[in-house]
């Protein structure tokens, strides 16, 4: 339910829930020792890559002294981040060891090709762990990855030597192969036994070593509980302030709508009725016309009040639920809109506050698709799985340009009160997919 990769150098808000890299794919545990040896080779190659990356980072840091390396700071930091993300992903996919990641959004201007934002990102403990991890895993990852490969290669080599002992053995040759002296009478047999032992050792330890590396990855890269609590407190403080501000804005909006709409109509209705009362005895025909006008004004006031109620809580949402409320909204739009729900969504009871937030989120996203995307068709889908409500709106329009207006900013603030997130991505056809995720566990 989470995006697979978050950018620590991005200013976009990130969720307080901790996504697990690799969780979108099934865990691929295996007892096949040859597969485990192959995975060890991949870890060793990654360790070589980490050594090269560290060397490059040192070169970039040195070049920054003469300003040449400044444009290289941001891409280098991004490579470190993506390498750590890959290690988190492999730990989960190969061994089911979850290594959650959560980066703080970088604040302030990017400056100097993004280098200032990179420096500010080091205030985030997750970013610091990424760099420390690269330094330590370049050594430990290579050792754990190469151990089983080296043992397997040594065992295979000794067995080959034992089988061809007479072909390569030269009388008087004084040499040792591992712990075996080639001049011993039973050197050929000892080579075969030793080689077999190396092979068995490699096959037995390959899986344990990759699992050990996964747990080492979790120990080194996982977000600490104290950091989670600290971030949670920060988020609660921020969302509480935003919720209070949004509530005040909503009250002011209702007051403004009442004053400019229904209240003005009701005042006009009262004036019309007063005039009709005065004319009733003198000019009944004129009074009848005023009463007809008053009737029209009462209908208009009623429509205003109904519209105001729909803006607070649509009756169809309270009566028929989120799916039918969105379908009722979709039929009023000028573009064909498909509204579907998954089977898990139909089986979940959505709390009323989340239903309301999801409805207005869907309404805002559909409105944006109509106004800005030049879409010819929009698909809205509801899903509920892994303790989350997901609402996705996909259009075939011109694609999102990355700019956020007041509606999207307000929507993010509204969703933040429920620990919800809003993300945008491009579809394969070039349109936009907006995804809202709201956790249900707290309600």
Image (cartoon, rainbow, N blue to C red):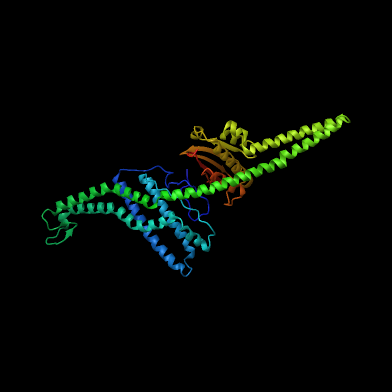
Q: Position of residue 207 (x, y in %)?
A: 30, 47
Examine the rendering and report whether any part of residue 151 can be seen: yes
In screen coordinates, is 49 left or right of 321? left
Count of marks overlaid on the render:
0
Q: Residue furthest bottom?
A: 66
Task: Give coordinates of residue 124: x percent, y percent.
Answer: 46, 55
Q: Nearer the viewer, residue 188 or 342?
A: 342
Viewer-nearest residue: 23 or 40: 23
Along the line of sight, which residue is nearer the eye, 325 or 350? 350
In the image, 297: left or right of 24? right
Q: Quadrant of residue 143?
A: bottom left
Q: Residue furthest left?
A: 185
Q: Residue 202 appears at what percent x and percent y?
A: 26, 49
Residue 423, visible in the rendered structure? no
Is 53 rendered above or below residue 249? below
User: In the rendered view, does 12 fall on the left or right side of 266?
Assistant: left
**In the displayed image of the protein, which residue is found farthest to the right?**
282
- Residue 86, percent from left and from top: 41, 51
């Amino acid at each position: 339910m989470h995006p697979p990769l978050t950018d620590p150098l991005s200013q976009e808000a990130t969720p307080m829930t901790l996504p697990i890299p690799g969780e979108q794919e099934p865990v691929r545990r295996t007892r096949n020792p040859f597969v485990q040896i192959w995975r060890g080779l991949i870890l060793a190659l990654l360790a070589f890559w980490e050594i090269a990356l560290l060397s490059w980072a040192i070169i970039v840091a040195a070049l920054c002294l003469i300003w040449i390396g400044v444009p290289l700071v941001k891409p280098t930091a991004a490579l470190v981040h993506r390498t750590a993300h890959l290690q988190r992903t492999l730990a989960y996919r190969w061994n089911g060891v979850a290594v959650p990641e959560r980066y703080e959004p970088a604040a302030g201007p990017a400056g100097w090709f993004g280098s200032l934002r990179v420096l500010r990102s080091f205030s985030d403990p997750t970013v610091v762990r990424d760099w420390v991890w690269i330094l330590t895993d370049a050594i430990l990852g290579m050792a754990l990855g190469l151990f089983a490969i080296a043992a397997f290669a040594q065992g295979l080599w000794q067995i080959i030597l034992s089988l061809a002992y007479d072909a390569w053995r030269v009388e008087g040759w004084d040499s040792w192969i591992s712990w075996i002296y080639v001049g011993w009478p039973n050197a050929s047999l000892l080579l075969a036994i030793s080689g077999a032992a190396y092979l068995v050792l490699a096959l037995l330890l390959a899986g344990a070593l990759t699992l050990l590396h996964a747990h080492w990855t979790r120990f080194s890269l996982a977000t600490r509980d104290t950091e989670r609590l600290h971030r949670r407190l920060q988020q609660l403080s921020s969302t509480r302030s935003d919720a209070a501000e949004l509530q005040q804005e909503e009250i002011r909006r209702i007051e403004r709508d009442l004053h400019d709409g229904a209240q003005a109509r009701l005042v006009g209705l009262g004036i019309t009725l007063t005039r009709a009362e005065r004319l009733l005895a003198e000019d009944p025909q004129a009074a009848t016309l005023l009463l007809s006008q008053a009737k029209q004004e009462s209908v208009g006031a009623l429509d205003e009040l109904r519209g105001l109620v729909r803006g607070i809580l649509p009756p169809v949402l309270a009566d028929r639920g989120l799916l039918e409320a969105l379908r009722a909204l979709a039929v009023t739009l000028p573009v064909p809109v498909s509204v579907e729900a998954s089977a898990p969504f139909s089986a979940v009871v959505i709390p009323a506050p989340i239903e309301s937030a999801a409805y207005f989120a869907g309404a805002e996203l559909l409105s944006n698709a109509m106004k800005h995307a030049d879409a010819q068709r929009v698909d809205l889908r509801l899903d509920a799985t892994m303790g989350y409500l997901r609402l996705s709106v996909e259009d075939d329009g011109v694609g999102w340009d990355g700019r956020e207006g007041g509606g999207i900013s307000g929507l993010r603030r509204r969703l933040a009160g429920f620990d919800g997130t809003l993300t945008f991505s491009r579809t394969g056809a070039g349109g936009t997919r907006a995804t809202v995720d709201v956790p249900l566990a707290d309600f």
